[in-house]
Amino acid sequence: MTTHTMLEFNKSNQIFITTNNENNIKENEQKFILKMLKAGVHLGHKIKKWNPKMSGFIYQKMQGIHIIDIVQAYMYLRKACQLLYTTASNTNYKTFLFTGTQEQSPIPNCVIKNASRCGSFYINKKWLSGTLTNWKNTKKSLNTLKYLKLYQKTKSFEKISVKMQSIIEKKIYKLERYFGGIQNMTSLPDVVIIVGQQSQINTSKECQKLKIKNITILDTDCNPELVETFIPANDDSSSSLNLILGELQTAINLGRQVFCKNVEFATNTQSIFQII
């Protein structure tokens, strides 16, 4: 019986990297695909609302909607997890940015939930054009946010007029809304995870321009030609998004564990801050 290393599952049927025999792998693959079906990962948009470029990932039409090929969804998810795991375990510390801003959808909540679980950055309110491509200006906004938040905690803030306090608080609120999830990001991310392509076209374009690796969840109304790595899946339901993003953040966490194990301190004077 052959054994080899690949993406496997833990007791909760989550994808991770391990060595196992072929029979167990097939059984666990089937269990996880069933879990994907129960989460509605295969449910696409109505037939009229689709992008023909996604035809290769559509299994069939049923009751007026397109059904995504669940096996392909699984294979592409596995590929994305492998990429994140390998990147996170790199000897050079890597950073990840989750983004999804579509209003009146479960996307923003799913983004912040899963990004927070793997210590990653996120943007879930609005993507401002030039966030990455005009990083110099973005960094100025981040520094302003940090300064104002610190100033707000000082005694000097209490001494200024109520009107000025209100102006500063409104400024902080505005900056928090746009940059709160990346306020500690000191450089461009190594990988961007995009949810809701329709509202994140500018994000994809900025990643392409800067040659930043990106992973996008693509529903049946999306365009696979605009992204580098993608997962064909339902991006409209919280169950589907939490399952997929849950696997991605698990891959990052497992990669981080390997990174921490492999970090070697040359001398006692070298700190973790010099490495990350």
Image (cartoon, rainbow, N blue to C red):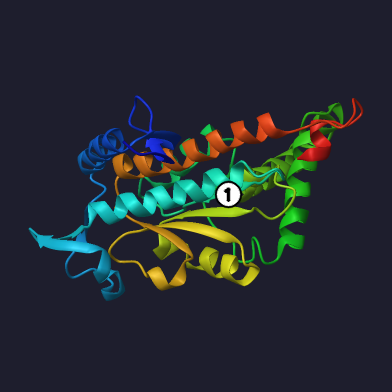
Q: Return the x and y of residue 245 as percentages of the image width and height.
A: 42, 43
Quarter of the image holding residue 159?
top right
Q: Is residue 58 above or below residue 176?
A: below
- Residue that numbered label 1 is attached to: 97
Q: Residue at x 31, y 49 (%)?
A: 74
In-front residue for pair 82/98: 82
Residue 108 visible in rendering: yes
* Pick the front one: 112 or 39: 39
The answer to whether residue 71 is above or below residue 29 is below
Q: Is residue 174 left or right of residue 145?
A: left
The furthest residue to the left: 63
Q: In the image, 48: left or right of 75?
A: left
- Tell me if I can see residue 176 in this picture: no
Residue found at the very far front of the displayed protein: 1
> From what the image shows, is residue 135 above or below residue 154?
below
Q: In which image quadrant can residue 166 be found?
A: top right
**The quarter of the displayed image where residue 133 is located:** bottom right
Residue 273 position in % (x across, y down): 81, 35
Q: Residues within 10 Å of mark 1 (few under 14, many from 20)?
A: many
Residue depicted at 43% across the width and 34% down the height: 19
- The quadrant in which the C terminus is found is top right
Kind of residue indicated by mark 1: Leu
Q: Position of residue 26 (x, y in %)?
A: 26, 39
Q: Quadrant of the N terminus?
A: top left
Total numbered circles? 1
Measured as percent of width and height from the top left, residue 125 is found at 51, 50
Secondary element type, mark 1: strand
Q: Residue, x 85% and y 26% (percent of image)?
A: 155
